[in-house]
């Protein structure tokens, strides 16, 4: 079963980070955002260097139960494993634009924003969540973060409570014709003819991992590429390929795996034990 360490290991072994040459020119993607998504998918499927598209698709099918779209979370789901959200940033300090989907520590099958195909992709009720953030500059992947969302985002009730309070407040505005919606609000019959509606949607923004975890992580400057992965010890110890990663560390001097403590996203007064994995080319 693939996990976050699988992607780390495959990126290190491939040493391929040029999105333009590998993806765009091979017609696997029409943009750098699509190219990054394909790269991340390939990193989990061990197909970064696969030149045979048929063979690649077979391997991806074995590893993933669902591949999504830009409109609904998640971007991908590993079979019997985590869900993955992939975001491209063009400046290193840019916020992640999550649109109407709130940050997620875990993914739940009853999330109203999931497509039916995601709910029915396999038998599941909740999944771990991974944020994969790529800083792309001049069509090259400069930095990639693979983050265990349980140490990045708060529990879903934190975001739900805020959303519902705002929604309730909007609904108390007098003399407005509100309609049921999963968004913050929908107002019908705005104009006299009754042919105009107003949708009120939230736009969730999330600081990217390079900014959030700058107290434990700094890239190696003047390098072509940096990889940063962060995993809770709780999850790390359960991964069957952790020894494979640690063995690889003895063979690759640019790879480092160290113990760190990060702030609990639900209570910053507490610290969570994690493994910080870094690699550079």
Image (cartoon, rainbow, N blue to C red):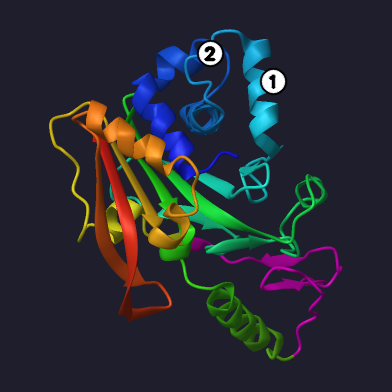
- Residue 253 in view (yes/no): yes
Which of the pair 178/68 is nearer the observer? 68
- Sequence order check, earlier mark of 2 and 1: 2
- For label 1, the crowd category at 10 Å Cα-Cα, with few meaning under 14, some 14 to 19 and many 20 or more, is few
Q: Is residue 224 above or below residue 188?
A: above
Task: Give the prevailing secondary structure in the magenta stretch.
Answer: loop
Q: Where is residue 153? Give x, y as percent.
A: 46, 66
Q: Residue furthest top?
A: 52
Q: Secondary structure at mark 1?
A: helix
Q: Residue 189 in magenta?
A: yes
The residue depicted at 26 percent of the width and 30 percent of the height is: 225
The residue depicted at 24 percent of the width and 35 percent of the height is: 255
Which of the pair 194/24 is nearer the observer? 24
Q: Secondary structure at mark 2?
A: loop
The residue depicted at 43 percent of the width and 53 percent of the height is: 236
Distance from Cα at disc 2 to Cα at disc 1: 11 Å
Q: Quadrant of residue 182?
A: bottom right
Q: Where is residue 118? Give x, y as percent.
A: 75, 48
Q: Residue 36 in magenta?
A: no
Query: Quick check: 111 left or right of 128?
Result: right
Give the quadrant of the C terminus.
Answer: top left
Q: Which residue is mark 1?
A: 58
Residue 50 disc label: 2
Q: Are marks 2 and 1 in contact (CB under 8 Å)?
A: no
Write the start and end of the magenta stretch as one range: 175-204
Query: Quick check: 53 left or right of 234?
Result: right
- For label 2, the crowd category at 10 Å Cα-Cα, with few meaning under 14, some 14 to 19 and many 20 or more, is some
- Residue 16 in view (yes/no): no
Q: Is residue 24 above or below residue 158?
A: above
The mark tally for this picture is: 2
């Amino acid at each position: 079963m693939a996990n976050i360490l699988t992607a780390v290991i495959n990126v290190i072994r491939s040493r391929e980070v040029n999105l333009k040459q590998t993806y765009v020119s091979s017609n696997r993607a029409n943009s750098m955002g699509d190219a990054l998504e394909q790269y991340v998918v390939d990193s989990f499927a061990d197909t970064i260097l696969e030149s045979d598209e048929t063979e690649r698709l077979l391997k991806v099918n074995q590893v993933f139960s669902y591949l999504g779209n830009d409109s609904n979370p998640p971007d991908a789901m590993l079979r019997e494993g985590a869900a993955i959200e992939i975001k491209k940033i063009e400046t290193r300090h840019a916020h992640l634009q999550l649109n109407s989907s709130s940050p997620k520590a875990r993914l739940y099958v009853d999330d109203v924003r999931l497509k039916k195909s995601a709910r029915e992709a396999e038998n599941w009720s909740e999944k771990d969540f991974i944020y994969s953030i790529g800083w792309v500059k001049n069509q090259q992947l400069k930095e990639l973060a693979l983050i265990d969302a349980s140490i990045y985002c708060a529990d879903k009730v934190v975001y739900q409570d805020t959303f519902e309070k705002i929604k309730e407040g909007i609904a108390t505005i007098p003399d407005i014709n509100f309609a049921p919606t999963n968004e913050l609000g929908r107002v019908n019959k705005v104009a006299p003819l009754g042919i105009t509606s107003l949708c009120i949607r939230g736009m969730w923004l999330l600081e990217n991992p390079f900014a959030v975890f700058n107290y434990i992580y700094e890239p190696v400057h003047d390098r072509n590429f940096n990889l940063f992965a962060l995993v809770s010890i709780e999850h790390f110890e359960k991964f069957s390929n952790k020894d494979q990663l640690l063995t690889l560390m003895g063979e690759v001097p640019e790879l480092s795996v160290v113990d760190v403590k990060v702030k609990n996203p639900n209570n910053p007064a507490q610290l969570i034990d994690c493994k910080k994995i870094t690699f550079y080319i």
